[in-house]
Amino acid sequence: MTEAVFRETTAEPRTQAVPLSHLSLELGHLYMEDFEAGPERLRRHFAQVVHWAEAVRETARAETGKRPRISTCFLIDDYFTRFSTPRELVPILLAEAERAGLDIDYLARESGCAEAEGAPVAEAVAGRLVEAPPPGAYGARPPAGQTGWLANGERSPVARTPQAMKKAIPWQAPRETAARQHSVFLDVELWSERPGGRKLWSCPFLAAVWQLARLGLLRNEGEAVLTPRPHEGPFPDDWDEMPPLLQLRSRAAPFAAYRTCSVLPNRFLPVEHAVRVILDQTEVDPGALQQVAARSAGEGVAVPASVADRISYVFYAGQ
Amino acid sequence: MNAGENDGEGAVLLCGEVRTCLLPAHQALDIRAAAQLLRLRADERVLVSERPNLYARSPDTLTGVDCPLPSATGAKVRAVGAVAVRGTLTEGRVLQTSARLGLTARGPDHRRPWGHYLVRPGTLEPFGRLPREAVAEGVLAGARRGELDVGLIADGLLTVLLRHPLLDQHPPFKSRPTRLRWTALPAAPGAPGPSIERLTLAEDELRTLRLRVPPGADPAEVAGLCEDLALHDWLLTTVVRLLDGSRLGSADGTAVVRALRPAVDHLLHLWMPRARLEPSLAALWDALEERPGFNRQWQVLVRRIRDQLALHAVPALHQEAVMAP
């Protein structure tokens, strides 16, 4: 088609592109209990992670057939509990990683997955949830979902106290939509309400947002969100003063990537199952999706079409 | 070209339904309020355009379906996917919701993980092979209970939008909403371009439209054409009804003016066929100029309204003429 003579920028969709690596490798999450357990816990964690991280890198090399662009990241919880300060904690964290021979390229704060520099990231992702239809859904308004919850199938009907002269309805099993013979039914709490009505996002939900950020699929009105800020000077005394996503190494590969891999202790397994359930029912920005598809096709890298299939894990035994 | 370039990927049958109604608000919404009304998602902009008329369009939202398709032959074909639906507001006055989907020629005989369908918004995959002619006819004839009902999805969004707190529920005049149900099959190889096979005005404010479009046509653009047709058909229907109710000739002057005034205040400036259509689809309007002659009918209606108002604007002269022997 010929270039239009007249254009209105407000009438055209636009999506900002973000640079992409082959793989985003997450070296861990840090919660208050980990911090309270002392630096030895971090030391043990990184001592485990280093071997798996090497295996993951080796796999990526074998898959891409060349030197893959891999960036590493680490997530600190400052959303559910506030503990310590960046000035005190970050140097310990970096020292322990270095001792194990690991480099952390990007450091993220969990609250950045709820709201990043004014962009309502979590709220936006919640608005993009499209529940998987149970067989038989034909377009009638879906039965009122359990607000704040998301399941991977149909819930058991609510059991009512039987009225006199009426038979009690026997219990009916919930059903996983994608079940093969038998169900593994999961119902995920996405948020709860804080006093005053504000939402407290759940850990799995923020983890799903975190995955989308690492896959370069988050946008706010077409603009990239959670873009890395370079690290300068000492770490601040308040978490709020630290950018939600900090780039620690200037020569690091891009933060976002075609695929992600997270090396985590196996206590995260239920959370990450929930993340898959959420990602499987999230319609990500089509413009962002297309950019990733075009870029990966351009450099001959196979990227699974389904977003949930782009993430992977290594769960190791331990706390 | 469009946010939904992925949608309809490989689709061999497009279909949809458009609802068109008067915005239930005393004042037409300005462009900012229009953008507020249509903001269906926190992270996506409402597209707004001021040339050649005020127009706002919501982002697409999706509704998942997994059900049999309507079919003229009664063949039971199950399909799964996400139907796309959007809302538009023209000149702050006419509200439309439009649901659309594309069906692929064939699909696996089992349901895939939901994430597979979500990266193809607006595309449904049948179980097995799609009997497209039978389904196209079935869609236009209307779904039976339990079968895919695109109209319900357009209705669902309309219900949500009509409840918006920006709307005072006091429309300036009475009117009826219309429904336009459409299908588009690929044009035969060698066909010069898209064509309208049939446009039917049925009772109950239902219109059905059967199109042929070049293979690979963008479903969002085809839906745009159908929205444009639906908007202008609604304008014709509504103005005809206003004229019908005004009892020209018999009623007294003030009554006629009162009856016709809403048309002048709210409708006459809305006529602007093919304002934002993709050029090859815009050409379809030419066929409608031949028969039934949309533009021709509109021009006649406008002239009639203006003549009536002019006639009643000179009551004194009119009186004199009657009194004179």
Image (tube, rainbow, N blue to C red):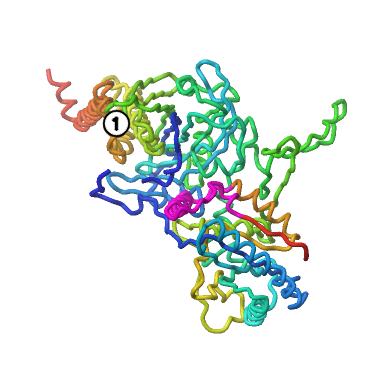
Q: Which residue is mark 1?
A: B257
User: Which residue: 30% across, 27% down?
Assistant: B256
Residue A297 shown in magenta: yes
Q: Is residue A228 left or right of residue B214?
A: right
Pick out the residue farthest to the right: A164
Question: Along the line of sight, which residue is nearer the eye, B289 or A277?
Answer: A277
Q: Position of residue A268 (x, y in %)?
A: 72, 59
User: Vertically, is A175 above or below B291?
Assistant: below
Q: Quadrant of the C terminus of chain A?
A: bottom right
Where residue B18 sits: x, y (%)? 43, 32
Report x, y in % for residue A85: 65, 79
Mark 1 crowd level (few <14, some 14–19, many ≥20, 10 Å Cα): many
Q: Which chain does tag 1 point to? A: B
> In the displayed structure, would residue A41 be above or below residue B103?
below
Name the residue at 30% across, 22% down: B251
Viewer-closest of A298 and B147: A298
Residue A42 location (% of width, % of height)? 72, 74
Q: Is residue A130 visible?
A: yes
Which residue ends up furthest to the left in the rendered image? B325
A199 magenta-colored: no
Amino acid type at circle 1 is Val
| Residue plotted at (47% across, 23% down) | B132
Provide the residue span drawn in magenta. A282-311
Numbered disc 1: secondary structure: helix
Name the residue nearer the viewer: B251 or B130: B130
As drawn, which residue projects farthest toward the bottom?
A234
Q: Quadrant of the N terminus of chain A?
A: top left
